[in-house]
Image (cartoon, helix red, strand yellow):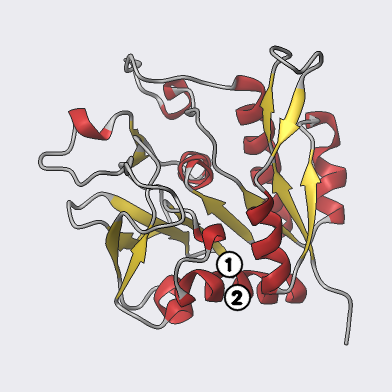
Amino acid sequence: MGSPPVIGITVDSEPAGGSATQPWYALRQNYCAAVARGGGLPVLLPHAEAEVQRYAGIIDGLVVSGGDFDVDPALFGAAVRHASVTTKDARTGFEMAITQAALAAGKPILGICGGQQLLNVVLGGTLIQHIPDTVVSAVAHEQEGPRDRPGHSVRVLEGTLLHRIVGVNEIAVNSAHHQAAQEVGEGVIVNALAPDGVIEGIEYVHCRFCLGVQWHPEYELSEGDSKLFAAFAAAAAEA
């Protein structure tokens, strides 16, 4: 049996403050656990844009993680910035660069929640800046319950890579976002929808595995979530 594929995972960053006397990186442990259970070897990626090409050469696959912040609307051509938008420009700059490098190298990519939104922007798409102000009769995309319980269901569209992976037409998901993909770029297709029509998943047809989901499959609430990480690791092992 060969070595597991090396899966780079982007991390969050916070400035010094409170009990932290220096800036710090952070990532929930379940990202690494889900990657490992899927068959990958997780490694965390500091925000060093100068090292992006080295990172892309070392990793076999890339997970762009979520976070409590937004992509700068200027990056997808928006003339107006919603009052709810908060950004982490250094993190976004690094994540865009490593995603572009992974695409260029043909490495599998899995974008999760905010990572899916970033992936959509990298691939030429735009974002809904605040779902409650845009979508009529929207479901609770920022669910009140804990993230280890489902908040709503999504319909998985037939004929997509995601559908081939999960093998079902509907799955229950957790939900922790106020933004979502709006328009998708050339070569990008929608693979999942919420009951209110909000895009819950995308994939890029010009890559063997380049997929984003709006929920947090690292909690592995369903068999489909676990299958997603296994399929991602398998694709990375072949890269």
Which residue corresponds to the image point at 54% horizontal and 76% vertical from the top-left? 227
| Amino acid type of the residue tagged 1 in the rendering | Phe
Q: Is residue 237 left or right of residue 187?
A: right
| Amino acid type of the residue tagged 2 in the rendering | Ala
Per the image, the residue denoted by label 2 is 231
144 is higher (above) or lower (below) than 84: below
Residue placed furthest toward the bottom: 1
Q: In the picture, which quadrant includes the C terminus?
A: bottom right
Q: Is residue 8 left or right of residue 224?
A: right
* Few, some or many residues within 10 Å of mark 1 (<14, 14–19, 20+): many
Which residue corresponds to the image point at 68% horizontal and 27% vertical from the top-left? 13
At mark 1, the secondary structure is loop
* Few, some or many residues within 10 Å of mark 2 (<14, 14–19, 20+): some
Q: Nearer the viewer, mark 1 or mark 2?
A: 2
Which residue corresponds to the image point at 30% horizontal and 41% vertical from the top-left? 182
At mark 2, the secondary structure is helix
Image quadrant assignment for residue 127: top left
Per the image, the residue denoted by label 1 is 209
Q: Where does the image place residue 122, in percent across and percent down from the top left?
A: 53, 41
Q: Tags 1 and 2 in contact by the CB under 8 Å rule?
A: yes
Image quadrant assignment for residue 187: bottom left
Q: Where does the image place residue 163, in percent across and percent down from the top left?
A: 39, 76
